[in-house]
Image (tube, rainbow, N blue to C red):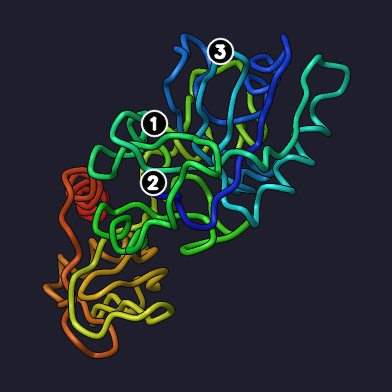
Amino acid sequence: MHRLPDRAILRLTGPDTLALLERTVTHKVADWAEGEARYGALLTPQGKIIADYIAHRTAGGVLIDVHEDAADDLMKRLKMFRLRSAVEIGRDEMLVPAIHVDGAADPRTPKLPRRSIAPAGDVAEPLPGWDALAIAAGIPEWGRDYRAAEVFPTDINMDLMVGIDYKKGCFVGQEVASRMKRKGLIRKRTVRLKGEGLVTGAEVRAGTAGLLGTVTSAATGEALALIRTDRFAKSIADKQPVTVNDAPADIDGAPWLIAEVKAHLEAMADE
């Protein structure tokens, strides 16, 4: 069992714990079984991500696995929204997020190992190569690919990873998030790239389509990039190759991306 790097645990307990999360965060709270992990975030009123996390339902409440640099801000904001609700919120320094075969499935993708929360003394050193694993699985993460108030949920594909429940009664930033969903064509997505010489911060370009976006994280031969999918569709229509630092790069044609590019191409044809 290895510790997950750069992560911390928030503990929420009390009879109003689920009610607090229901009205503030993006993920579904109803029908949450003990031992199940759910992916979600707290947004700004303008709809950008303050912190995303993986939350574990326990017999006593909820444990939130969040990037250590975002933990204190998330805790402060949840306490602010608590008002008079019967919820205790604090950091649990005795527990750490870990990888374990008997843990909960990572709610973002089955391509990543199962996750658990364990006493700090029972966990080995941080898991080596975690960033490479996440990049290969196409999963952007807070602290590596973005930080607070930099991206919208759809920019990092939260809607594709069941991180947003658009049918909930409410959550902070819901109006903006729902409006972006209703517009139909998402213009920015995080995609997986393959190629040589991929480095964080490099520009992703495609001939006449121009600047598609920027590499947000990279490992050997693979990277994640936040790109404009409408411009990517234009590059396909114009048969322009994708490049990073003037070297060829391939964007992974995941089924959801193929469908969205097709929708952009159809919209272009109707103009």
Query: Which of the labelled discs sits on residue 59, or is there none?
Result: 3
Between disc 3 and disc 1, the foreground one is 3
Q: Nearer the viewer, residue 168 or 180?
A: 168
N-terminal of the two: label 3 or label 1?
Answer: 3
- Residue tagged 2: 157
Q: Which amino acid type corresponds to the residue marked 1 in the rendered image?
A: Val
Q: Quadrant of the N terminus?
A: top left
Q: CA distance from mark 2 to mark 1?
A: 9 Å
Residue 168 position (above or below residue 145): above
Q: Nearer the viewer, residue 67 or 100?
A: 100
The residue drawn where x is 67% and y is 37% is 92
Q: Nearer the viewer, residue 110 or 13?
A: 13
Q: Secondary structure at mark 2?
A: loop
Q: Secondary structure at mark 1?
A: loop
- Residue tagged 1: 162
Q: Which amino acid type corresponds to the residue marked 3 in the rendered image?
A: Ala
Q: Which amino acid type corresponds to the residue marked 2 in the rendered image?
A: Asn
